[in-house]
Image (tube, rainbow, N blue to C red):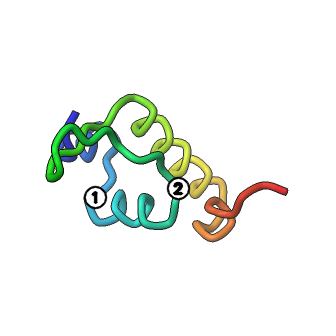
């Protein structure tokens, strides 16, 4: 799926999704061409999980930290 569908399916803005990628919170998308990114259900599930953790009171800093 493309970014627009990812936004629609998750209810999360493009800017926020890009923030998640930048901070290592999402796996890299498939890139069949240099300027094309393909997202899948793993991306949808990860974004929804991040949003769920936020709704439970965790900050993005805590969500993005690796577990020890």
Instruction: Give the residue at the far right of this rendering.
Output: 68
Q: Quadrant of residue 40?
A: top left
Compared across the picture, whether 64 is left or right of 34 comes to right
Circle count:
2
The percent position of residue 52, horizontal first and vertical second, equals 56, 47
Q: Earlier along the polypeptide chain: callout 2 or callout 1?
A: 1
In the image: residue 48, left or right of residue 66: left
- Per the image, label 1 sits on a secondary structure element best described as loop
Front one among 44 and 34: 34
Where's the N terminus, which quadrant?
top left
Q: In which quadrant of the rendered image does the C terminus lie? A: bottom right
Q: In this rendering, would 63 be left or right of 68?
A: left
Q: Is disc 2 placed on a helix, strand or loop?
A: loop
Q: Position of residue 44 (x, y in %)?
A: 40, 37
Name the residue that disc number 2 marks: 25
Could you tell me which residue is drawn at 47 percent across and 42 percent down? 48
- Which quadrant holds residue 19? bottom left
Seen as rendered, the residue at the extreme top is 41
Q: Residue 66's x, y, as percent?
A: 72, 58
* Residue 13 badge: 1
Residue at horizontal 39 percent and vertical 29 percent from the top: 41
């Amino acid at each position: 799926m493309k970014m627009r569908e990812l936004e629609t399916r998750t209810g999360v803005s493009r800017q926020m999704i890009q923030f998640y990628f930048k901070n290592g919170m999402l796996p890299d998308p498939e890139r069949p061409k240099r300027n094309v990114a393909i997202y899948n259900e793993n991306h949808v599930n990860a974004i929804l999980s991040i949003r769920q953790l936020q709704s439970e009171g965790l900050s993005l800093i805590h969500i993005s930290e690796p577990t020890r």
